[in-house]
């Protein structure tokens, strides 16, 4: 049976989409801003208040990412591809975890730092696949490891260092993906028809 699309054509489409979307880097930059604010609030708010701020603030990441598309030249909403649907549905899936976060918030609000850090990472491997981005996939593993290590190894830093670490990893992801977009653009240009 002949496949509908070859592996090479699929990979080429994923890379084209990645370049057209500018790596979607405005979203990790927006995520970094969110986590920086949470790191600052971690030393100023009680744990339950912090958890509520974290929950409410997470809804601002996507709109902020939309606003940053132009300045960062990452117009991910204008980029169209059949593989893009996978990333959108993975974002829908992580939002289905909100009932669990609210239960966690009521049982032990300090757990929210770990639950959000992990839950807000679950779509990154799918984004990495959609974009053919090794940086996005590495970011997911680094986030899970850093969040877990800080949460369990440095319990007094759960509301400060953990958010700042997540912000740092988001910034590294945005920078890495920007470099990866530039590399991919050059590589695609080398294969462009004359």
Image (tube, rainbow, N blue to C red):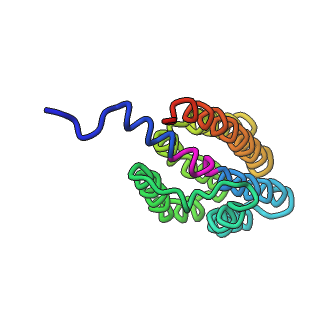
Q: Quadrant of the N terminus?
A: top left
Labels in figure, total? 0
Q: Is residue 141 visible?
A: no
Q: Nearer the viewer, residue 176 or 42?
A: 176
Q: Position of residue 141 (x, y in %)?
A: 58, 34
Q: Is residue 75 visible?
A: yes
The image quadrant of residue 150 is top right
- Residue under the point 37% across and 36% down: 9
- Residue under the point 68% across and 60% down: 69
Residue 18 shown in magenta: yes
The image quadrant of residue 170 is top right
42 with respect to 131 (left or right): right
Outermost residue, left side: 1
Q: Position of residue 47 (x, y in %)?
A: 74, 60
Q: Main secondary structure of the magenta part?
A: helix
The image quadrant of residue 64 is bottom right
- Residue under the point 73% across and 67% down: 49
- Residue under the point 58% across and 35% down: 189
The relative height of residue 103 versus residue 153 in the rendered view (above or below) is: below
Q: Nearer the viewer, residue 32 or 16?
A: 16
Q: Position of residue 134 (x, y in %)?
A: 56, 32
The relative height of residue 61 versus residue 152 in the rendered view (above or below) is: below
Q: Nearer the viewer, residue 142 or 88?
A: 88
The relative height of residue 113 versus residue 58 in the rendered view (above or below) is: above
Q: Which residues are magenta?
A: 17-24
Outermost residue, front side: 194
Residue 136 shown in magenta: no
80 with respect to 164 (left or right): left
């Amino acid at each position: 049976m002949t496949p509908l699309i070859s592996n090479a054509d699929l990979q080429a489409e994923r890379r084209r989409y990645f370049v057209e979307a500018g790596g979607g880097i405005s979203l990790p930059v927006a995520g970094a801003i969110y986590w920086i604010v949470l790191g600052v609030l971690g030393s100023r708010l009680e744990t339950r208040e912090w958890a509520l701020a974290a929950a409410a603030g997470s809804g601002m990441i996507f709109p902020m990412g939309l606003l940053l598309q132009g300045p960062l030249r990452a117009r991910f909403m204008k980029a169209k591809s059949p593989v893009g649907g996978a990333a959108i549905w993975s974002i829908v899936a992580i939002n289905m975890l909100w009932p669990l976060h609210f239960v966690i918030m009521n049982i032990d609000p300090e757990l929210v730092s770990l639950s959000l850090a992990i839950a807000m990472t679950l779509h990154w491997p799918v984004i990495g696949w959609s974009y053919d981005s090794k940086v996005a996939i590495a970011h997911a593993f680094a986030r899970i490891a850093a969040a877990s290590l800080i949460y369990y190894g440095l319990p007094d830093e759960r509301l400060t260092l953990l958010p700042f670490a997540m912000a740092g990893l988001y910034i590294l992801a945005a920078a890495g993906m920007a470099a990866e977009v530039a590399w991919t653009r050059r590589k695609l240009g080398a294969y462009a028809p004359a």
